[in-house]
Amino acid sequence: MTIAKQKFNSQQYHLMAEAGVFNPESRIELIKGEIITMSPIGRKHGSCVARLDRLIQQLLANKVFVWVQNSILLDNGSEPQPDLTLLKLRDDFYEERLPTPEDILLIIEVADSTIEYDRHTKMPLYAEFGIPEAWLIDVNAKTLTKYTNPSPKGYKSIESLDGNDVVLVLEIEIAIKDILGS
């Protein structure tokens, strides 16, 4: 006997949400046609996202739009919810349509319990769709991994940074220790 998985497209996913199939408080995302339940946001994770949001808003005001824990549309079967996405500015604030790869400057994933999933599922997915840069922040190890040079097989450049390093965002330096906190 063969076991088959049911794959969903973006329209089906949204129709299910509108029909109340999902608990409104559930944290889910669509990845390659599969509905994935995301882990609850822990204290370290939440504070890192808040710190990043504040830093980026202060340093890059009027240069990018910061999309916090909202869906992006990679294709008809993938709508992940990165922790932060830096987007090109648009007058409608992305009300007319979800951001797509052409709109994305940087994706940031923050992980405490999901580091392996983010590293082995989400980073390759972002590379496959040509996202120019992605960061994976491990709040437990207090590291930031920077992924650049996307290709269909993954990112070609991967750099590990810690609290002693700085990272560039649109030519603005951010100290890793300011992202990770004490």
Image (cartoon, rainbow, N blue to C red):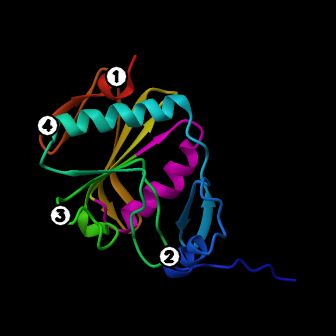
Labelled pair 4, 1 in contact (Cβ < 8 Å): no
- Badge 2, how many Cα within 10 Å: few under 14, some, many 20+? many
Pointer 2 or 1: first along the chain: 2
Chain part drawn in magenta: 109-131
Tag 3's secondary structure?
Answer: loop
Circle 3 residue: 90
Of mark 4 and mark 2, the one earlier in the sequence is 2
Graded by Cα atoms within 10 Å as few (under 14), some (14 to 19) or many (20 or more), the crowding at tag 1 reads some
Task: Kindly state the secondary structure of the residue where label 4 is placed.
Answer: strand
What kind of residue is marked 1? Gly
Q: Residue furthest right?
A: 1
Q: Is label 4 in contact with label 3 (beta carbons under 8 Å)?
A: no
Asked which secondary structure carries label 2, the reply is loop
Q: Earlier in the sequence, mark 4 or mark 1?
A: 1
Disc 3 residue type (three-letter): Arg
The mark that comes first in sequence, 2 or 3, is 2
- Which amino acid, by three-letter code, is at mark 2? Gly
Above/below status of 121 relative to 128: above
Q: Label 1, on which residue?
A: 163
Measure how far apart labels 4 and 3 are at the Cα level.
Answer: 21 Å
Q: Position of residue 162 (x, y in %)?
A: 36, 26
| Sequence-earlier tag: 4 or 3 | 3
Q: How many neighbours does mark 4 have within 10 angstroms: few (below 14), some (14-19), or many (20 or more)?
A: few
Query: Where on the picture, by quarter, is residue 95?
Result: bottom left
- Measured as percent of width and height from the top left, residue 106 is found at 28, 52
Q: Are marks 2 and 3 in contact (CB under 8 Å)?
A: no
Q: Which residue is nearer to you in this view: 55 or 92?
A: 92
Dots 1, 3 in contact, CB < 8 A: no
In-image side of 42 versus 145 (left or right): right
